[in-house]
Amino acid sequence: MNYRHAFHAGNHADVLKHLVLSRIFALLARKEAPLAYLDSHAGVGLYDLAGDQASRTGEWLQGIARIWQAETRPALLDDYLGVIRQLNPDGALRYYPGSPELARQLTASRIACSSTRSTPRMAPCSRTTCPATAAWRCTGARAGMYRGR
C-alpha cells in the first residue's frame, strides 16, 4: 500500500489523535521524571497545508481549519493550539505539526523519543524537525530518534 500522510494531515482523525497526545504530553511534562515516548506510526514533524499534497485533498479544511477559525474554543485545546500558533505566527494557518513536533514542543526537551516508519523514504523527512542534538539510527526501513538527558 502506498500511503502518504501529507494528503491527510490536519484532517478530523489527525486532529483527534493530536489533541489527545497534546493533553497527555502537557500533563506528563508537569512531572519531574524523564519521559519516554514511542510512536510506531510517526510521520514527519511538520506539514505544509498549502503544499501540493495537502492541497489536493483539502481534508484539513474539515479538521484543523474548523477549530482554528472557531470563535470560542475549550481551554483543553490550549496546549495543542499553542504549538500550532508558534508554527503560524502571522495567524494564517499554513503549517501543521505532526506527532514528533508536538512531543518536542510540549515536553520541554525532557523526552526520550523513538519514532519508526515502515517506509524508508519517510525517515529522512522526520529528521528535519529534530534538533541538532538528536541522535539518529537508521537500519533498513526503520529510523529511531533518541533524545533526552
Image: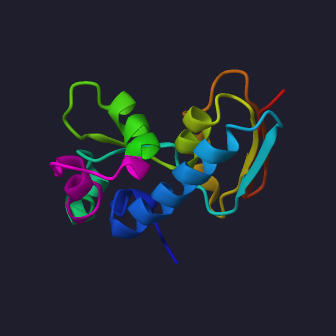
Residue 89 x %, y %? 28, 25
Q: Number of callouts in the render?
A: 0
- Comparing 75 with 117, the one in front is 75
User: Which residue sits at x=23%, y=45%?
Assistant: 50
Relative placement, left or right, of 94 versus 27 is left
Visible residue check, residue 28: yes
Please say which color scheme the image uses. rainbow
Q: Give above or below for 79 relative to 128.
A: below
Is residue 18 inside the magenta stretch?
A: no
Residue 43 x %, y %? 54, 54
Relative placement, left or right, of 141 versus 2 is right
Please identify the quarter of the rendering in which residue 56 is found: bottom left
Is residue 70 inside the magenta stretch?
A: yes
User: Which residue sits at x=48%, y=56%?
Assistant: 18
Q: Which residues are magenta?
A: 61-77
Q: Quadrant of the C terminus?
A: top right
In the displayed orientation, state which residue is furthest to the bottom.
1
Residue 138 x %, y %? 77, 45
User: Which residue sits at x=63%, y=25%?
Assistant: 131
Please identify the quarter of the rendering in which residue 140 is found: bottom right
Please identify the quarter of the rendering in which residue 40 is found: bottom right
Relative placement, left or right, of 115 versus 33 is left
User: Which residue sits at x=40%, y=60%?
Assistant: 15
Main SS, magenta residues: helix
